[in-house]
Amino acid sequence: MGGQRASSGGRAVAARARRERAVALSAELIVDRALELTEREGSAALTMRRLGEELGVDPTAVYRHFRDKDDLVLACMDRIIDNAYASLQPGLDPGDWRAVLRAVAQTSWAMCEAHPAIYALTFYRVTGGPGERKMVELLLSTLAGTGLPADRTVLYYRAFIDAILGVCGMKAATHSLGDGLQEKDGSAWTRIYAVLPQAEYPAARAHAQELAAVTQREIYTTIVDAVIRLIEDALPT
Amino acid sequence: MGGQRASSGGRAVAARARRERAVALSAELIVDRALELTEREGSAALTMRRLGEELGVDPTAVYRHFRDKDDLVLACMDRIIDNAYASLQPGLDPGDWRAVLRAVAQTSWAMCEAHPAIYALTFYRVTGGPGERKMVELLLSTLAGTGLPADRTVLYYRAFIDAILGVCGMKAATHSLGDGLQEKDGSAWTRIYAVLPQAEYPAARAHAQELAAVTQREIYTTIVDAVIRLIEDALPT
DNA sequence: ACCTGAACACCGTTCAAGT
DNA sequence: ACCTGAACACCGTTCAAGT
C-alpha cells in the first residue's frame, strides 16, 4: 500500500512505517517489533536506531517506555517465556513430575532455537516478570509435590533450571554468532581435532568421527536425564 | 618514574606506558596485558583503545598480531585454559576418572571466578588452541579408559563439558554485569519472589527462604554429581 | 504527555602515510 | 616489517525543544 519505490533507504523505511503505524506506541508494541526484528535479522539488528525505524518513530521514543536497552531486552525474554508457558500449560499432568520437567526442558530448547538473540542476551538474567514467575511456580510446585523437603526441592529446582539455561544459552549464543564464526566453530572437530598429531593426541584422533557426529540435541537430552535421575534417587521412599 | 604530574589523562598514561615498554610488541605480551586489564577492571574495559593505552602503543597496532578483537579474546581464553591445565596436571591419577572429572570441574569454576569477562565472552566458543586441545585429550582419554565404547565416551564427554561450560558461563556472565545490574538480579529472590501474592504463587512463597539461601556452588556440585552418576550407571560391568 | 532531533561520548576497524 | 593517526560507520543515551 502506498509504496511507490521498490528500493528504500532507512529514511524511506521510517517514513513508510510512520505512515502505517495506526496505533499508539506502547511497551507491548515495542516488544512485538523487537521480537520480529531479531527473529528475522539476528541479534546484530537489535539497535535502538533500527528498532525506531521498525516502529516508525524516532529511536529515542523507546526510552519513554523502557529505562534502557537492558530493560527492553528483559521484557522481550519475559514475553517469550510467557508464550512458552501458555503453550505448555494445557497438556500438563502436575502429578507426573518427570513429564513436567521434560516438557519444560523441551520448551526451553524451542525458545533458544526460535529466539537465539534474545535468549543469548538474557539466559543468565532474572526478568522478574509474569512469564518467569509462572514458570518458577510451576517447577517449584511440581518438585514440592514429590514429597522432597523444602531445601532439596529448591536445590534440585535450581540444578535443573541452571543446567537447562546454561546449555540452551550456549546453543543460543553459538546460533547468534555471525555466519562466518558459526561455520568456523562448527567445523572445528573436523578442521582441527581430526588432524591433530596422532602421537600427542591419540584419544582425540581415535574419537574424531564420533566427535563430529554427536548432536547438541543428544547432549542436551543426556544432561536433562542426568538431573532427572539424580532427583529420582533423592526421592523419599 | 619520571612522571612529573600526579593526575594523568589517557594521553599521559599512553606516553608513560610507551616509555616503560622495553620489549617488542608480541601476541604473548598483548594477551598478558589484556588478561591483567580485564581482571583488574572488568569486561567493559576491554576495548582496543584501552588495551593500546595499557601496552603503550597505538590501538591499531594490536591488529598486526590478531585479525580482530574476537581472535584476541579467543587467544586470551586459550591462555587461561592452558594455565589451568598446567596447575591441574601434576596431581592427577588418570585411572581415577571421577577424580579427574571433579578436578576439571573445580578448575573450570576457578577460571570463571578469576576471569569472568573473558570466560563470559568465549565459553560457547572453540579456541582450537593448545590449552583446549590438552583439556580435550585429557577428558577423552580418561573417559575412554573406563571401557566405554567410542560413541558413549564422546556423548558423556560432551554432556560433562557442556554442562560445566554452560553453568560456569552463566556465573561468569552474571559476574561481568555492572555492579548495579548484578545487585538487581542477585536480590531478585528476596525483592520479587519472596513477596509474590500467596494465593497465586504458593510454592514460590513457601520456598522463599530456601531460594535465597541456596548457593551457586552447591548447585554446580549437584549438576556435576548428576553427570558423574549417569556415567557410573552406563559403565560396562 | 509524549515525541523529535541534535549532540555526546564512546565503539571496532580500515588504510594511507610514516619510520 | 611494523607502527601511527586520521577517518569511517556505527553504538546507547541525554536533553532541550517542539506539539
Image (cartoon, coloured by chain):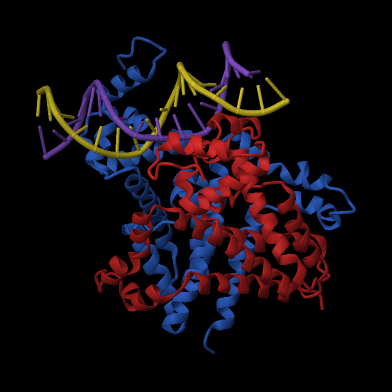
Chain colours: A red, B blue, C yellow, D purple
User: Observer-nearest residue: A137 or B233?
Assistant: A137
Residue positioned 30% across, 20% down in the render: B16
Task: Tell me the quarter of the picture where residue D1 sits.
Answer: top left
Q: Residue furthest bottom?
A: B237
The correct choice, above or below, for B180 with respect to A194 in the image is above
Residue A115 image offset from top left, x and y in percent: 55, 56
Please state if A235 lies on the left or on the right of B82 as rendered. Answer: right
Residue sitting at x 67%, y 73%: A228
Quadrant position of the N terminus of chain B in the picture: top left
Q: Nearer the viewer, residue A86 or B108?
A: A86
Q: Quadrant of residue B65?
A: top left
Q: Position of residue B180 (x, y in %)?
A: 62, 34
Q: How many numbered discs, if any?
A: 0
Q: At 33% across and 27% down in the image, what residue appears?
A: B53
The quadrant of the rendering that contains the C terminus of chain B is bottom right
Q: Is residue B122 visible?
A: yes
Residue B219 pos. (x, y %): 65, 59
Q: Is residue A141 left or right of residue C16?
A: right
Residue at the right extreme, as displayed: B199
Towards the viewer: B22 or A186: A186
The image position of residue A140, as x and y in percent, is 77, 61
- Please name whichever residue, D10 or B105, is drawn nearer the observer in this view of the structure: D10
In the rendered view, tell whether residue A68 sits above or below residue A86: above
In the rendered view, would you say B171 is above or below C6?
below
Q: Is residue B165 visible?
A: no
